[in-house]
Amino acid sequence: MPEETFAAATIRWYEKNARDLPWRAPDVGAWAILVSEVMLQQTPVVRVLPAWRAWLDRWPTPAALAADTSAEAIRMWGRLGYPRRALRLWECAVAIVERHGGAVPTDLDALLALPGVGTYTARAVAAFAFGQRHPVVDTNVRRVVARAVAGEPDAGPATRPADLVATAALLPVEPAEAAKASAAFMELGALVCTAQAPRCIDCPLVERCAWRASGRTVPLGPTRRPQRYAGTDRQVRGLLLAVLRETTGPVARDRLDLVWADATQRARALASLIDDGLVERIDDRFALAGEMTGTATPQT
DNA sequence: GAGCCGTGGAC
DNA sequence: TGTCCAAGGCT
């Protein structure tokens, strides 16, 4: 009897230990899965759960979202963070309607061409929504593969082609099993093979983990310093956008002036929001982009 | 490819 | 208070 593969062992663990997340239910469609994947980009599951339900309750199809304004999408995004994702998701819905008749495309290249859909998300949708056999490589999978297979303490900072190749080599031949293996690797990285304090005692791969065998080496050299947040343009952007989210219609400039004392940084942050397409200027006032769509605008 | 882009919870 | 982190994408 051949030795159980990494995938088989992880799938067995997954069947018993996976979280009961609503976007994994069998009757969930591709749009709902796509929305979940975008929301989960850099945002924890517990915060995505209520936002995902509310979003799909309001916009159950790409066409429904595309028919609404980008401003409503940005507003509905609330405090999930990285609001450019909301704009991209709205643009994505528009593109799905325009290019694909309102149905989420099944082809990987067509998915990759959608706004806000990159290497990870395209493969996640192709695998989890359509059962295709693609390596789905996120930060969890990269960490699991780096440790268990390569024996390294952690993965590189971004997904590389080599990561896709290494993960593809682990996938079962049968597409549905391959998709399940990807979900299982992700879950293992999220629950057991965590960035900090991995729970190797609960790991189904511990017997054959290369990193474990090497004595759990510690990374060499200087670790990358995390990006700070307090006092940055990102914080100011967040404060500005919060005002616009909570207000319907344009806001006067002096109201935005209240959120941050430094006028230079404030102006820079506001300009970057406009540049990103999240905010629009109407005369000397400001609103979420698309706020005035469909509103009668007097022409001079 | 390094840096930028939000937010809130855990420690 | 400060650090680190959480299913990335884009330039």
Image (cartoon, coloured by chain):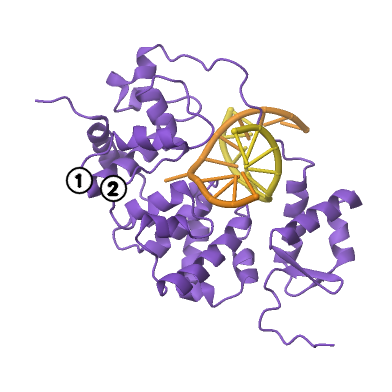
Chain colours: A purple, B yellow, C orange
Instruction: Examine the image and state in which quarter residue A284 appears.
Output: bottom right
Residue C10 point in image, percent of width and height: 59, 52
* Residue type marked 2: Arg
Closer to the chain start, of discs 1 and 2, is 2
Please report contact status of discs 1 and 2: CB closer than 8 Å, yes or no. Answer: yes
Say whether residue A193 is visible.
no
**SS at badge 2:** loop
Q: Is residue A22 left or right of residue A39?
A: left
How far apart marks 1 and 2 lie (CA) works out to 8 Å
Q: Quadrant of the C terminus of chain A?
A: bottom right
Say whether residue A85 is visible.
yes
Query: What residue is rendered at 48% in x and 74% in y?
Result: A98
Query: What residue is rendered at 71% in x and 78% in y?
Result: A292
Q: Is residue A13 above or below residue A26?
A: above
Tell which subunit mark 2 falls on.
A
Q: Is residue A256 left or right of residue A4?
A: right
Query: What residue is rendered at 35% in x and 13% in y?
Result: A213
Query: What residue is rendered at 53% in x and 59% in y?
Result: A115
Residue A34 point in image, percent of width and height: 43, 58
Question: Mark 1 sits on what residue?
Answer: A174
Residue found at the far top of this picture: A215
Q: Is residue A148 above or below residue A80?
A: above
* Residue type marked 1: Glu
**SS at badge 1:** loop
Of A269 and A45, nearer the camera is A269
Residue A223 point in image, percent of width and height: 61, 22
Q: Say which mark, if any, is on residue A133.
A: 2
Residue found at the far left of this picture: A1
